[in-house]
Image (spheres, helix red, strand yellow):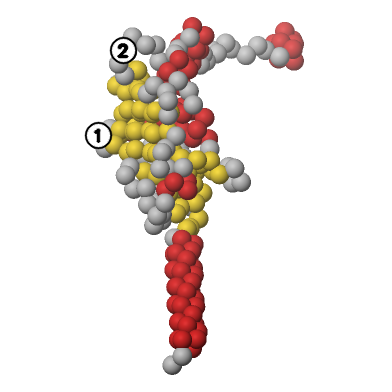
């Protein structure tokens, strides 16, 4: 076999090998895409099976900021590490309701790359402890500007990602000073408590006689 024929054959074989590699890559990419699409489903309900009244403590941290943490005892919230801090009870209760009322719009399972949801380095982390001592951690990632959802995962399972309402972020942006009770908020809370314990007065006054009845009595 001449040298030219051998070179030609070698080039053909090399070209065929490259083509096979490209086909294999395309097949794998399509399979991964199909797997990703199959693992995505519409969500419904809330992120956790937990109600606000069962929350014992809440702690959250925003990247670059100090932790904000509260513990509830006998129905009253106090700031962790500063028992003298006057916590606005209404705001703390609202925080608990927000954390447990997060609604899910979409669920993605078998996630291979949490970074595409901003969850490789979460912007916020939240830890909730219920009255049984069970802890639940929420990692918060990036916001989808198209759907206005934010991506989160629970505990250590970054392979399951949830798209939830961005309302979650509102309370997580507050530092501890936001939860400080002011004189106005304290007076308002006291007034509401007093009003709820006050029984409505019942009038015992007898109805007055009508003019017709008065005239009838005079004639008799």
Tell me: residue 137, above or below residue 175.
Answer: below
At 32% across and 38% down in the image, what residue appears? 136
Q: Where is residue 82 in the image (x, y as percent from the top left)?
A: 32, 13
Q: Where is residue 211 in the image (x, y as percent from the top left)?
A: 74, 12
Label placed on residue 83: 2
Q: Position of residue 22 (x, y in %)?
A: 48, 72
Tell me: residue 198, above or below residue 16.
Answer: above
Compared across the picture, whether 133 is left or right of 47 comes to left
Q: Is residue 191 visible?
A: no
Compared across the picture, whether 166 is left or right of 21 comes to right
View extreme (left): residue: 133
Label placed on residue 133: 1
Pick whichever, 114 or 102, lies toward us. Answer: 114
Which element carries disc 2, helix, strand or loop?
loop
Q: Which of marks 2 and 1 is nearer the N terminus?
A: 2
Identify the image quadrant of the C terminus.
top right
Distance Cα–Cα, label 2 vs label 1: 21 Å
Compared across the picture, whether 91 is left or right of 208 comes to left
Q: Where is residue 12 in the image (x, y as percent from the top left)?
A: 49, 82
Which element carries disc 1, helix, strand or loop?
loop
At 44% across and 34% down in the image, what residue appears? 123
């Amino acid at each position: 076999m001449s040298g030219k024929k051998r070179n030609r054959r070698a080039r053909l074989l090399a070209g065929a090998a490259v083509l096979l590699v490209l086909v294999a890559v395309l097949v794998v990419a399509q399979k991964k895409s199909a797997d990703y699409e199959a693992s995505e489903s519409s969500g419904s309900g809330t992120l956790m099976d937990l109600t606000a009244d069962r929350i014992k403590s809440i702690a959250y941290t925003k990247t670059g900021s100090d932790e904000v943490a509260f513990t509830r005892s006998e129905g009253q919230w106090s700031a962790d590490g500063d028992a003298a801090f006057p916590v606005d009870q209404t705001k703390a209760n609202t925080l608990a309701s927000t954390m447990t009322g997060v609604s899910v719009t979409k669920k993605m399972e078998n996630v291979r790359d949490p970074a595409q949801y901003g969850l490789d380095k979460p912007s916020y982390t939240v830890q909730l402890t219920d009255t049984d001592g069970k802890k639940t951690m929420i990692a918060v990632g990036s916001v989808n500007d198209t759907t206005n959802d934010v991506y989160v995962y629970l505990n250590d399972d970054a392979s399951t990602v949830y798209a939830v309402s961005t309302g979650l972020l509102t309370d997580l942006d507050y530092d501890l000073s936001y939860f400080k009770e002011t004189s106005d908020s304290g007076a308002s809370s006291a007034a509401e408590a007093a009003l709820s314990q006050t029984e409505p007065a019942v009038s015992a006054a007898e109805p007055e006689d009508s003019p017709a009845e008065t005239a009838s009595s005079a004639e008799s």
